[in-house]
Amino acid sequence: MKIKSIILAAGKGSRMRSDLPKVMHKIGGKSMLHHVIDTCKEAKSDDIVIVVGHHAEVVIESVTDNNVSWVYQNDQLGTGHAVIQAIPNIDDNDVVLIAYGDVPLVRSETLKPLCECIGDYDYALLTTKLEKPTGYGRIVRDSSSGEIIEIVEEKDASDEIRKIDEVNTGIVAAKGKQLKRWLSMLTADNAQKEYYLTDCVAHAVSEGAAITSVLCMDPVEIQGVNNRQQQAELERGYQARQAEGLMVAGATLLDPQRVDVRGEVTVGKDVIIDINAVFIGNVHLSDGVSIEANCVIKNSSIGANTTIKPNSVIDDAEIGALCDIGPFARIRPDTVLKDSAKVGNFVEIKKSTVGEGSKVSHLSYIGDTEMGANVNIGAGTITCNYDGVNKFKTVIGDDAFVGSDSQLIAPVTIKAGATIGAGSTITQDTPEHTLTLSRSKQVSITGWKRPTKLTNKDS
């Protein structure tokens, strides 16, 4: 069974009040269209055809997949008209799956059974039941057999039909040969003067085709986005789904409604995640990791039993086991913290390796640095790695001690076991197991008086 997906993504989305095409707006950090593309792939779709229209170039540039092809709907004349544009891409033997670029939360587990119906059936609809079905086309069935007769759009429906709670999601699967014939029979004889894809059902019924439906039990899956409010609703629905997945995997979420996943997060056992954590990109949390409140973690792996304290940001970094980070720490890209390293409050580390058991506890900047094991960096220390044009490297050997308020002017090497006196500016390599310091001579001036404020008389 070869599945060919057609994704409708031509709409402008004027109610979004945006210059961005509607399908490019994001849910969970990923565009709605990319959600649907990924879901079609998970449903084993061999080829994907995307129908574009409004700002087509923006949509096309966002997709780099070679298995995606594009067709244009220059005039917005309805869903049926959109699918008609893809007819040259449909082979007679294809199982054609039709999805929507602004319906991002449908699952592959929902689409697969729909496609698997084709063979035994000619046409399969995905339906759902809603307490308030306003705005949706209604599924009209034969009162005795229960077979689907037609789909009636709300604007064309009678009061009796509007009472039906089973609605059309718009997502369908069909045999390619029959679908092409039914599409050729569509007309715009309706209130909207559009070519409705749903009219294919009536044509299929008139030919005696075998029609079935699959009921989607979770209405969130089939909800579309037409405005910012609906986008926000689906964002919460998506995040609820991610939180559920994390808890099933063994994580404790102190408040599942206040965790945001904008990518893929994998967790080990006994992970604890406090409120307002944001995960971006690919993140792995090993066994026993604790993420405290208000942390942002992006494209990083966190080793076992590490604690990330509140208000810390970790970006594209590799954190070892038993580390202690924050609060208010910033770990920038290409940083590696070895096991048992400590990074304290108001410390920034960029493109550096911090060795096993080393500590940078307070108010420091470490950049372009290779730091050995069991190093202690005093408060206020900075590596001066940038001369305004080029970046240079600092090397700090095992067991070194750097006193508070020191400046290490790269390129420079602090050798193993060296001690740097507090307040020093180090411009040359320092020897092993030796105290090095650079300070101005301290003097005390007798007879000196503090300035006093001038009076009006004095001025």
Image: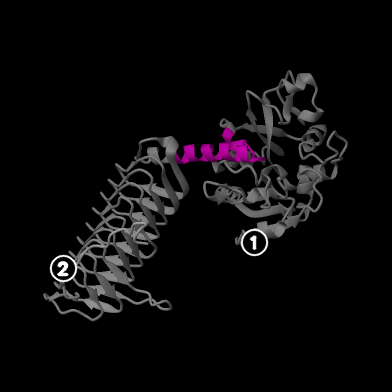
Residue 321 x %, y %? 25, 54
Residue 94 x %, y %? 69, 50
Q: Please indicate whether residue 195 sits to the left or right of residue 283 in the image.
A: right
Residue 256 x %, y %? 41, 36
Instruction: In this rendered view, identify the residue nearer to me: 201 or 393.
Output: 393
Say few, some or many: other residues with alpha carbon within 10 Å of mark 2 (under 14 / 14 to 19 / 20 or more).
few
Span shown in magenta: 220-243
- Vertical comparison of 159 with 113: above or below: above
Quadrant for the C terminus in the image = bottom left
Residue 215 x %, y %? 61, 31
Q: What's the residue at 15%, 79% (across, down)?
A: 431
Q: Which quarter of the figure has residue 184?
A: top right
Q: Please indicate whether residue 4 sits to the left or right of residue 266 in the image.
A: right
Could you say which disc has been placed on residue 447 in the image?
2
Q: Amino acid at mark 2?
A: Gly
Q: What's the residue at 81%, 42% (across, down)?
A: 182
Residue 199 on the magenta segment: no
Q: Amino acid at mark 1?
A: Glu
Disc on the earlier residue, 2 or 1: 1
By secondary structure, the bulk of the magenta-drawn segment is best described as helix
Residue 225 on the magenta segment: yes
Q: Is residue 304 visible?
A: yes
Local SS, label 2 = loop
Residue carrying label 1: 61
